[in-house]
Amino acid sequence: MGIVRKRLVWLVALAAIATATVAALPFASQAATAASVTVSAGGFALLNGTPAAAISFPPATLNGTSQAVTDPLAVDIGDATGSGSGWNVTAASTTFKSGANALPTTATTIQSAPTVSCDTGAAGCTTATTTVSYPYTLPAATVAPTATKLFNAVANTGMGNQTFSPTWTLSIPSNAVASGTAYTSTWTFSLVSGP
């Protein structure tokens, strides 16, 4: 029985040492994972049907003095190129005419810098910073002349979807002719890459 007892004591001692050794081993494990993403250039365009197909200034009644009527025209830009190269919007128009009657070629202006804001869902866009001086006069002639820059986004601005909203002013001189039909003009807008 003495030998069995000694062996049992040794077995208990060995079991205690084994338990202490196992308890001292760390149970944590680590692994490294490399994460990556490829970001590709997206589109560059006028969005949401802007500028609108038509702008309708409020009617004006001649009263012997020069008048001005205004109307906003939002322009929604989508710059998902990721280039940061900026962009500009140019415009030109034909002269406002009603039959043989015409308004001056300098009749259409933007008097102050347009507001600009990120579109819904485009939080974090980089809104455009423009270098265009205001008031801006929309160039006009019987045949539309060379377009001029009406708004731009300098480099590293104008990224993401955003809308700038100029308020257009149409000046009607005191000697305008009431022709009985609307004066009309065709405006052409272009979105161009680069400030």
Image (spheres, helix red, strand yellow):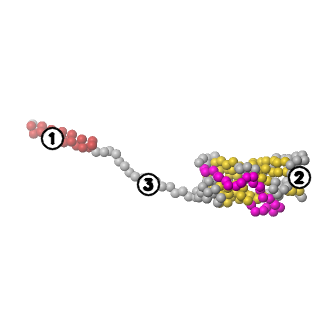
On the image, numbered disc 1 is attached to which residue? 10
Q: Is residue 56 visible?
A: no
- Neighbours of disc 2 within 10 Å: few (<14), some (14-19), many (20+): some
Where does residue 5 sit, x and y in percent of width and height? 12, 37
On the image, numbered disc 2 is attached to which residue? 176
Q: Secondary structure at mark 2?
A: loop
Residue 121 colored magenta?
no
Q: From the viewer's perspective, is residue 101 above or below residue 25?
A: below
Pick whichever of labels 2 and 1 is earlier in the sequence. 1
Q: Could you tell me what secondary structure mostly forms the magenta stretch? A: loop
Q: Is residue 140 left or right of residue 119?
A: right
On the image, numbered disc 3 is attached to which residue? 34
Quadrant of the image containing the N terminus: top left
Q: What's the distance in space between the residues labelled 3 and 1, CA to CA?
A: 50 Å
Dot in front, 3 or 1:
3
Q: What's the distance in space between the residues labelled 2 and 1, CA to CA?
A: 118 Å
Residue at the image point whose x is 82% and y is 54% from the top: 107
Residue placed most toward the observer, 152 or 61: 152
